[in-house]
Amino acid sequence: MTGRVEPSMMRQHLRMYLVLGSIDCPVDPTHVVQEALAGGATMIQFREKGDDALVGEPMIHLARRIQHQCHQAGVPYIVNDDVELALKLNADGVHIGQDDECAADVRKRIGNRILGVSAHTVEEAERAIRHGADYIGIGPIYPTRSKDDARAVQGTDILRILRDSGIDLPMVGIGGITAERVEEVLCAGADGVAVISAVTRAESAREAVETIAGASERFFLRKLANH
Ligand SMILES: Cc1ncc(COP(=O)(O)OP(=O)(O)O)c(N)n1
Ligand SMILES: Cc1ncsc1CCOP(=O)(O)O
Ligand SMILES: [Mg+2]
C-alpha cells in the first residue's frame, strides 16, 4: 500500500463488513468466509477471541487461510486486537478498541495500513481521529450475544450524535445488526454495517450477506436519487 486509504474507498469497504472467529461459526470458518465473499462481503475482520478460541499455530494457520481467501477476492483483511499478528501476516489493517493498545502507537507501528478504532462517545471518536484512525466502529447498536464484555446498548442515536457533532470519518455500526435493521443504521449516519452472527449463524452465509448488501445498496441508491 502506498498511501493511507481514501475516506471514499474506506466507506465502500465498510458497506458489508464481516467480523468472525472460529467460535462464531457452527461450521468451518473458511466455509463461512468463502460464502460471505461470494455473497459480496466488502471487508473481513479476523477476531479470534473467547473461551474456546484457537491460540498459537492453529490460530495463525486459520488467520492465514482467511487472509488468502480475502486476497483472492480482493477484499481487505483486518486483524482484531493483535497488532503483532497483523504485522507478521502483512494484513491490510488492524481493529482496536478502547481497552487495547493506544491507537496513536498502533498507527506508528502499522504505517499506512487500515486502522479501525471502536468508539462509544464523541470524545473517544475525536481522539481516535487525532490518533490516526481510518474508520470508527460504533456499538453495540443493538443487544448482541457475540461479545461477553460488550458495553451498554447504544441504539442508533449514538450514530446521529456523532454525525451531528461534525464527525465525518468513515463509520460502521456493530452489534445485533440484522438485514431488517440495516436501513435504520445507515439512516442514522453509518457508512456500513459490521456483523457477526447474522452471517456466521445463518443457514446460508452467502444469502445472508446478499440480503444485507442488497438492503445497503438500495439505501444508498435511494439517497443518491434524492440528492
Ligand atoms: C468494526 C468493529 N467495531 C467494533 C469492534 C469492537 O472492538 P473492541 O471494543 O476492541 O472489542 P473486541 O472486538 O476486541 O472484543 C470490532 N471488533 N470491530
Ligand atoms: C465485536 C462487537 N463489538 C461490539 S458488539 C460486537 C459483536 C457483534 O456481533 P453480532 O453481530 O453477532 O451482534
Ligand atoms: Mg479489541
Image (cartoon, rainbow, N blue to C red):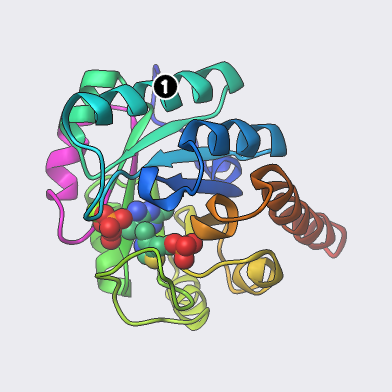
Query: Is 109 in the magenta?
Result: yes
For image coordinates 17% across by 39% down, the residue present is 106
Mark 1 residue's CB less than 8 Å from ligand 1 = no
Residue 46 in sight in this render: yes
Asked if 124 appears above or below 108 in the picture, the reply is below
Q: Does 220 sit left or right of 69 as displayed? A: right
Q: Is residue 5 above or below residue 160?
A: above
Image x and y of residue 160, in percent: 52, 77
Q: Look at the image and tell me whether residue 173 can be seen.
A: no
Residue at figure coordinates x 57%, y 41% from the top left: 8
Q: Is residue 20 magenta?
A: no
Closest to the observer, 60 or 18 = 60
Looking at the rendered structure, the kind of residue marked 1 is Arg
Left or right: residue 66 compared with residue 97: right
Q: Which residues are magenta?
A: 96-115
Left or right of residue 77: residue 183 = right
Residue 140 appears at what percent x and percent y?
A: 41, 72
Indicate left or right for 202 with 103 as reference: right
**Along the line of sight, which residue is nearer the eye, 201 or 82?**
201
Q: Residue at x 76, y 59 (%)?
A: 215
Determine the quadrant in which ligand 1 lies.
bottom left
Residue for badge 1: 65
Number of residues whose C-alpha sits closer than 10 Å to that of mark 1, classed few (under 14), some (14–19) or many (20 or more): some
| Residue 75 screen position, x and y as percent | 55, 28
Could you tell me residue 9's position as x and y percent? 56, 37
Q: Quadrant of the C terminus?
A: bottom right
Q: Residue at x 25, y 71 (%)?
A: 123
Residue 142 position (above or below residue 57): below
At numbered mark 1, what does the secondary structure look like: helix, strand or loop? Answer: helix
